[in-house]
Image (cartoon, grey):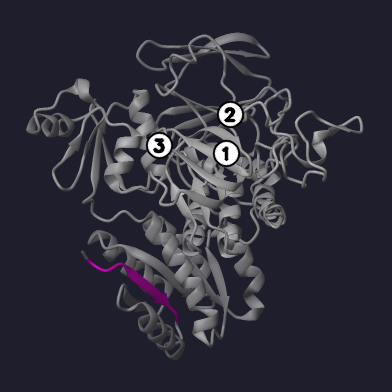
């Protein structure tokens, strides 16, 4: 396979040579470094590479060039290689233009000249961008293949599991084309056994489920130790932050991740307002980075569901979906929340068959040239709407309110207004879903009364449910099921039943000593990624104080 390309562009020959030499010294073993002396020459080179189907990982362009500025080049280069990372080299006087280009040309970073020493000012930035590119790059496919039916819940769940766990795969729809049937016939398999997973070694899993596939592809499903200092339930922003800080500070840390790094935030198509990422970051990328960071510090991850919590003296036992359990002194509950079900006629039967809860990014490409409907008016709905608009013919947002301003960040509202194939239907709600084998139509109620629209895909982002019914009653929750902690355990000046310690509970400590809670599942939490990260890191400090008592 050809090495991916790094393209440097500058009209100053001496500067261009210095850039190329620095790039080759650091990245020459893995990438092919090429050059162009103008924006137009660079575009011609990109078109030739595209025709030869050679990948381009990074574009590094100077801003001040005659004929075509760096911003203009990078903006036009997006049309040829939209996934390539774009970096602008600027003089200090061009900083404002570079910042504007983050929105107009969607550049990923800008660097001021000079960049000496490159070990401090060039390589850290480019290495980070290239790692991001590699995580999303799919070379000519040699991995596992999934044969399934788009409108089957099991197939949808399996594909979502693989995508969220960053397992490369190619999906083949059994209902379109002859390829799926040919592969099944070669292995004497039948359509009734779908979904089928084919592996590079020639083996296959029929009627495949996430647990069986996890074991086959090497995802860890069993803890290596019997006892840990801290067990974290959930791998969303709060859980991953706790894993990073706990492991880096010497705690033997186990993360029980039921699906994949990132939790609900991991399904976000793009988070634009998280500190430190001026061009935004996908939830999956954020989760992947945090997972790698925590693993580097020694945190252990298992792909399992937590199904129970048992207390025995100073030990806390987390019971797992396979019947095993792991013990620790400290447990941090950070499982995130789930979107609330629609609860309308037809919605349960058609879940996974056209109705999806959350972004379900795995379905985005399947919606190409279709009409997509999104229910919800908060940031998560806005992010998903913008993502689906890249594929769908039209995306219709259905919201009960009179507008988005009360529930959505302004930057998302502005972007939605600028996107021509997005329509916002206000004061409108879904009252029924119709269809036999899959979603075929929605019955809506709006300002003009009830009416019916054809629909094949509906994505739901309404409300939040904690989904911690597996916790024992000793972990006190509010009337909606969110976990109470710290000062919230005291009502009318008195501690709620269940707290028997002589001390006050720590800020994020639940009604069970040594069991902490962080993120969206906590009563009164702020539903933002940054807040969850903060709570996860703070919880580790309280865990240290709790452990100091042993």
In the figure, is residue 261 to the left or right of 462?
left
| Quadrant where the image shows the N terminus | bottom left
Q: Is residue 9 magenta?
A: yes
Q: Position of residue 274 (x, y in %)?
A: 64, 54
Q: Residue at x 19, y 22 (%)?
A: 191
> What residue is shown with label 3?
160
Circle 3 or circle 1, nearest the eye: 1
- Tell me whether the residue at label 2 lies in contact with that at label 1, contact meaning CB atoms closer than 8 angstroms: yes
Where does the magenta region start and end?
A: 2-10
Which residue bears the numbered disc 2? 467
Which label is found at residue 335?
1
Mark 1 residue element: loop
Farthest-out residue, bottom:
14
Q: CA distance from mark 2 to mark 1?
A: 8 Å
Q: Please tell me how crowded label 2 is: few (under 14), some (14-19), or many (20+) other residues with Cα within 10 Å.
A: some
Q: Is residue 420 visible?
A: no
Mark nearer the N terminus (2 vs 1):
1
Foreground residue, 337 or 539? 539
Secondary structure of the residue carrying tag 2 is loop
């Amino acid at each position: 396979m050809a090495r991916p390309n790094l393209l440097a562009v500058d009209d100053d020959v001496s500067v261009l040579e210095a850039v190329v030499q620095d790039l080759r010294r650091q990245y020459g073993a893995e990438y092919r470094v090429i050059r162009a002396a103008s924006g137009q020459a660079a575009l011609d080179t990109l078109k030739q590479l595209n025709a030869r189907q050679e990948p381009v990982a990074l574009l590094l362009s100077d801003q001040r060039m005659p004929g075509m500025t760096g911003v203009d080049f990078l903006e036009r280069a997006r049309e040829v290689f939209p996934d390539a990372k774009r970096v602008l080299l600027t003089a200090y006087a061009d900083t404002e233009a570079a910042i504007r280009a983050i929105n107009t040309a969607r550049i990923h970073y800008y660097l001021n000249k000079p960049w000496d020493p490159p070990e401090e000012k060039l390589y850290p930035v480019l290495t980070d961008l290239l790692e991001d590119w590699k995580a999303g790059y799919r070379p000519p496919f040699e991995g596992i293949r999934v044969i399934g039916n788009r409108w089957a819940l099991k197939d949808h769940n399996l594909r979502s599991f693989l995508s969220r766990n960053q397992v490369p795969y190619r999906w083949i729809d059994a209902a379109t084309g002859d390829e799926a049937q040919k592969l099944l016939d070669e292995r004497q398999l039948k359509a009734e056994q779908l979904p089928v997973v084919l592996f590079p070694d020639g083996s296959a899993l029929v009627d495949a489920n996430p647990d069986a596939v996890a074991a086959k592809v090497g995802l860890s499903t069993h803890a290596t130790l019997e006892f840990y200092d801290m067990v974290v339930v959930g791998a969303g922003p709060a859980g991953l932050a706790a894993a990073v800080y706990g492991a880096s500070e010497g705690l033997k840390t186990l993360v029980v991740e039921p699906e994949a790094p990132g939790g609900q935030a991991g399904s976000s198509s793009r988070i634009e307002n998280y500190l430190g990422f001026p061009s935004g970051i996908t939830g999956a990328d954020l989760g992947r980075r945090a997972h790698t960071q925590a693993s580097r510090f020694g945190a252990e991850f298992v792909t399992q569901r937590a199904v129970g919590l048992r207390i025995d003296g100073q030990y806390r036992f987390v019971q797992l979906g396979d019947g095993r359990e792991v013990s620790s002194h400290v447990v941090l509950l950070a499982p995130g929340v789930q979107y609330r079900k629609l609860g309308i006629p037809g919605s349960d039967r058609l879940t996974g068959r056209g109705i999806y809860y959350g972004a379900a990014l795995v379905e985005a490409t399947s919606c190409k040239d279709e009409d997509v409907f999104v229910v919800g008016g908060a940031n998560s709905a806005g992010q998903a709407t913008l993502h689906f608009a890249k594929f769908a013919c039209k995306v219709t947002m259905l919201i009960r309110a009179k507008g988005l301003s009360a529930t959505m960040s302004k930057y998302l509202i502005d972007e939605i207004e600028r996107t021509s194939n997005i329509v916002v239907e206000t004061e409108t709600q879904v009252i029924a879903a119709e269809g036999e084998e899959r979603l075929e139509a929605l019955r809506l109620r709006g300002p003009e009364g009830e009416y019916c629209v054809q629909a094949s895909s509906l994505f739901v982002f309404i409300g939040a449910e904690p989904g911690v019914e597996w916790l024992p009653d000793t972990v006190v929750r509010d009337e909606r099921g969110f976990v109470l902690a710290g000062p919230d355990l005291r009502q009318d000046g008195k501690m709620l039943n269940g707290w028997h310690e002589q001390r006050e509970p720590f800020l994020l400590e639940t009604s069970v000593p040594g069991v902490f809670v962080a993120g969206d599942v906590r009563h009164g939490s702020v539903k933002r990624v940054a807040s969850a990260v903060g709570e996860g890191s703070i919880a580790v400090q309280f865990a240290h104080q709790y452990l100091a008592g042993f």
